Image: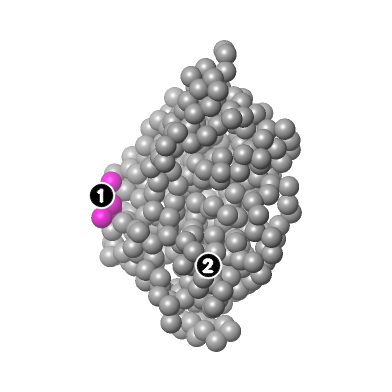
Amino acid sequence: MTFFDLADPAFDVTSPVVHAVREEQWYVETSYGWAVLRHEEGAALLRDRRFQQGNGKWPEQNGVHSGLFSDWWKETLLSLEGDDHARIRRLLMPAFRNKVIAAMRPQFQALANELIDGFAPRGEVEFISEFAEPYAARIICQLLGLPDDDWKQVAHWADELGFSFSIDVGNQVPRIEAALSELTAHLDKVVADRQANPRDDLVSTLVQASVDGDRLTRHELDVALAFLAFAGMETTRNQLGLALQTLLKHPDQWALLAQRPELGGNAVEEVMRVNPTVTWVTREAVEDVDLNGLHIPTGGVVQVLSHSAGTDPRAYPDPTFDITEQRPPHLGFGAGMHHCLGHFVARTDMAVALPLLARRMPDAVPDGPGQWLPVSGNTGALRFPIRFSAQRP
């Protein structure tokens, strides 16, 4: 049986090695249980009620058995299961309704143009620090009703908390816990203020949310908002960098996106199919499960490899990157009971940003290789310099 060492930073889950194995078998053994390589089996497993999320054991799998990070991680929506998960998700839902997020499109568009204005006259940009990070962090500030000036601090906390998803998480606990403590304290003050002085923002919506008389406690709000602030910012920043990486390799698609901004939503889906920031989605068996010749005992962990599933020729016979195509759903936001609650925020803000970038940087090309995280776990660019023809102010 083939073995993939997902704990090795040098292992690339998008490599030809993975594709070759996918043609021979639908799963492999890994350092974190099993990995599913094909789309049909992956999509079915993510919706299978015999599995739960499985992320709750991530700290333990990396030698972290107690402490602030471990306790918080087990309380996030990502780790909760059963009735606890259903209750918290139900109470968080009002703040993430599509209509609420869609109404923010003009704000997202204004922010994207403002940021592009800052570097367009130079004809060059370090895309992550000058666009992706401030765009993602300032949108989080808008959602939470935080002052726009808070974005750099929020981005710093999110960067530190991003090590929670790193395969090096065991060595990063002190910086994770420092950021978590500071971010939670900051957000707790915001919650207290909205309880006394409600506004038209996400925090006020969650403070007031009630289902059959049930409300989120102050602690539950703190946990949820801290997770939202870091996960929403980090994944959007990373996915934007990966989107530019992909689109700039396909100049015809970049030009098409500039001409047809209505394809922004499709572009997001196509990028996440072939170049997702979340490279695997975890599930844990809650009972003994037999799947097509694979026996998974109770407690067994399975990773669905997003890129491998998203490029599986059985589901996508024509693998060509094409933002005009309507494809079977990718698995980058998960599926089933644990489908990402904030997916519409990410889809909307990226669908707004990408066409604007394409229109205002039509001849953009990478200016060097950049600096990238390992292509395993959660991936993305640390630095991605781009050059293009300067625009006059």
Q: Position of residue 76 (x, y in %)?
A: 46, 56
Q: Position of residue 361 (x, y in %)?
A: 58, 28
Residue at the (73%, 52%) spot, across then down: 325
- Please state, as top left, top right, bottom left or bottom right, where the C terminus lies in the image: top right
| Label 1 neighbour load within 10 Å: few <14, some 14-19, many 20+ | some
Q: Residues within 10 Å of mark 2 (few under 14, many from 20)?
A: some
Lateral position of residue 80 relative to residue 110, left or right: left
| Closer to the eye: label 1 or 2 | 2
Rendered residue at 58%/84% (across/down): 292
Sequence-first tag of 1 and 2? 2
Q: Which residue is mark 2?
A: 19
Q: Is residue 140 left or right of residue 330?
A: left
Q: Quadrant of residue 259?
A: top right
Q: CA distance from mark 1 to mark 2?
A: 37 Å
Name the residue located 67 percent from the left edge and 35 percent from the top edge: 255
State the image coordinates of residue 322 (x, y, percent, origin top left).
68, 49
**Residue 111 visible in the displayed image:** no
Above or below residue 288? Residue 224 is above
Q: CB atoms at circles 1 and 2 under 8 Å apart?
A: no
Residue 199, above or below 249: above
Q: Amino acid at mark 2?
A: His
Q: Position of residue 8 (x, y in %)?
A: 34, 63
Near-viewer residue (55 or 209): 55
Q: Which residues are magenta?
A: 171-175
Dot 1 amino acid type: Pro
In the image, residue 56 sits, relative to residue 183, either above or below, namely below
Residue 174 is marked as: 1
Left or right for 369, reference 258:
left
User: Is 44 contained in the magenta span?
Assistant: no
Which residue, as the protein is rendered here, is positioned at the far top? 393
